[in-house]
Amino acid sequence: MLTNLAPCESTRQVQKLALLPLMLVVMSLSGCASYQFGASSMFQPGIQTIHVPIVKNETFRHDLGVRLSEAIVKEIDRRTPYKVTGNPNADSTLQVTITDTSKQVLSETNDDDPRALNSVITASAKWTSRSGEQLMQNSLATDSDFTMAFGEESRFVPEAGQTVATATQATIEKLAARIVSQMETRW
């Protein structure tokens, strides 16, 4: 294609192509200085460490708090750039409380035995920075209430060999994923 051009014209075209990378760099730097791109734009700037105390449990199921704490820590490690630490002086703290747990009967046999059930867990979460700034955003909350409510459920069928224990663990994992999803910044 360059062979059909005059020598002077081909030199100008080569010069234009050589300037193209420089122009792209200048254009990319001339935008908004605070603009972030990539996966890091999804998370709070300035937060590197997070303290996750054992989840407070207000239900009769004593093991749920520890299990949800472990699931939240795994989700944070897997999906976020934050480093979970045991130090309460971390950049931020995520406090979670399990407020209720139940089984809901979805269908019954002719003898009134439960055929399909839901394992339900509800919790509240509050994520604050070291300075007390609320990091988890809830557009429906009043100014005095900074906690967010979460609820998850998992279906199980005892007749098919499924147990409440496996359904509860699935619910815990879904609840942890949902809480960690709320740690992403809003657009």
Image (spheres, rainbow, N blue to C red):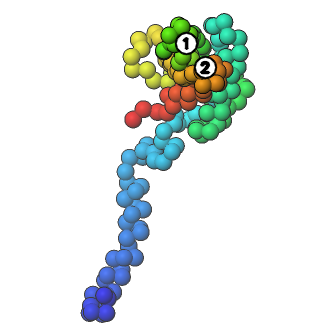
SS state under label 1: strand
Residue drawn at the location 41% of the way across and 55% of the way down: 29
Left or right of 47? Residue 16 is left
Quadrant location of the C terminus in the rendered image: top left
Q: Where is residue 130 shown, x and y percent of the image?
A: 60, 23
Which residue does the numbered mark 1 point to in the structure image?
Answer: 114
Which residue does the numbered mark 2 point to in the structure image?
Answer: 158
Q: CA distance from mark 2 to mark 1?
A: 8 Å
Labels in figure, total: 2
Q: Which mark is residue 153?
A: none
The residue lying toward the viewer, choosing from 70 and 183, is 70
Q: Is residue 5 above or below residue 36?
A: below
Q: Amino acid at mark 1?
A: Pro
Q: Amino acid at mark 2?
A: Pro
Residue drawn at the location 61% of the way across and 33% of the way down: 75
Left or right of 91? Residue 7 is left
Q: Is residue 32 above or below residue 61?
A: below
Q: Quadrant of residue 162?
A: top right
Q: Where is residue 157 shown, x and y percent of the image?
A: 57, 21
